Image (spheres, rainbow, N blue to C red):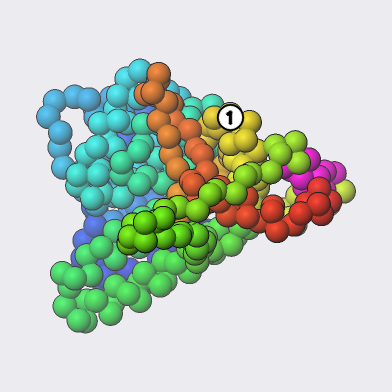
Amino acid sequence: MVQAAFAHPSAPAAMAALPLTVAIFADRQDVREELQDDARVAGLRIGETSPLASLLEGEARPLGDLVLVDCPAIDAATLAALVRLDLRAERAAARLVVATSLAALDDVFACLDRSGAQILVAPARAERSVALARAIAAASAGRLRDLSEDERLTLLRLTEQVGMMARKLDRLSGDEDGDVGAFAFNAPRRGFRGAPDGSAALVRASRPPLPDARLVRKIIAQRQARAKFFEPSLFADPAWDILLDLTAARVEHIRVSVTSLCIAAAVPPTTALRWIAQMTEAGLLERVEDESDRRRAFIQLSDTAADAMAAYFASLGRGAGSLA
């Protein structure tokens, strides 16, 4: 089962050499107990375990290395608690994992803009365990410089084992998107020319135009039509679906919420969120705050990605409309 995947003989030794503490905040008691069980099996030290409201009570307390949060429903107090927690996690360099619902996703996403939190949408227990494994690996890797050589080698082995656990749990949870940790992009070359006066100043070459939004929407519809005849997962390509949707939206001058983009990615929401995070880190996507409502945030193409999409469609010429 899921717990057994964490129970590796080397885990306690590595955690003893470098103990990691986890704080758990959840209103549902059964979820708090489940998270505590998984944390213990993973060899973590349990710190604070409280309802979400405790985040707003009294002075801020130490968070620990990892913070697990469950908030399927959102109200004003929960939003305030998440904003405060996001700030505290950033300052403490804590790894934050937040589980929510699809209905609350936009609000939760808008609150978590500083700490690099993992966001899970209606996760099964196996999916929570995958996220916990990733958080352990990230938190442990950040401390490598403080270890002796023997401890460093022990932890590196453990980190590799955690990665294997995560991949096994991905398969158990039905998440077949593969190892997104290997995801990488190279930014396309940008064209520059010298200034007219011959100085060393650089001037950006004219930006290529994006394709007609109707063409991009046609391609998206053609891609979606395949699901009527084949298993949808056979064609899962969330990065490309995200780029297509945001390309059309940019031409249409439409702002895209994270929930809408998760739907456009045509994969489970938690998987889509990982791709959005990876593509943002790669400089292809940008998070944009809603100036009129700080509780909302949108995703858009970066100029780099927009230029690349424009160049791609330009290279296809008239044949672009036949793509699916």
The extreme front residue here reads 197
Please tell me which residue lies in front, 296 or 165: 296
Residue 259 covered by magenta stretch? no
Label 1 sits on a secondary structure element that is loop
Residue 196 x/y as whole percent = 41, 55
Q: Residue at x 35, y 76 (%)?
A: 157
Instruction: Determine which residue is flagged by label 1.
Output: 253
Residue 272 x/y as whole percent = 56, 46
Q: Is residue 224 left or right of residue 147?
A: right
Above or below — where is 36 with respect to 149?
A: above
Residue 60 figure quarter:
top left
- Residue 83 visible, this angle: yes
Q: Which residues are magenta?
A: 216-228
Above or below — where is 273 with respect to 14?
A: above
Q: As shown in the figure, which amino acid type bears the numbered disc 1?
A: His
Residue 144 figure quarter:
bottom left
Q: Residue at x 16, y 42 (%)?
A: 62
Q: Residue at x 52, y 43 (%)?
A: 301
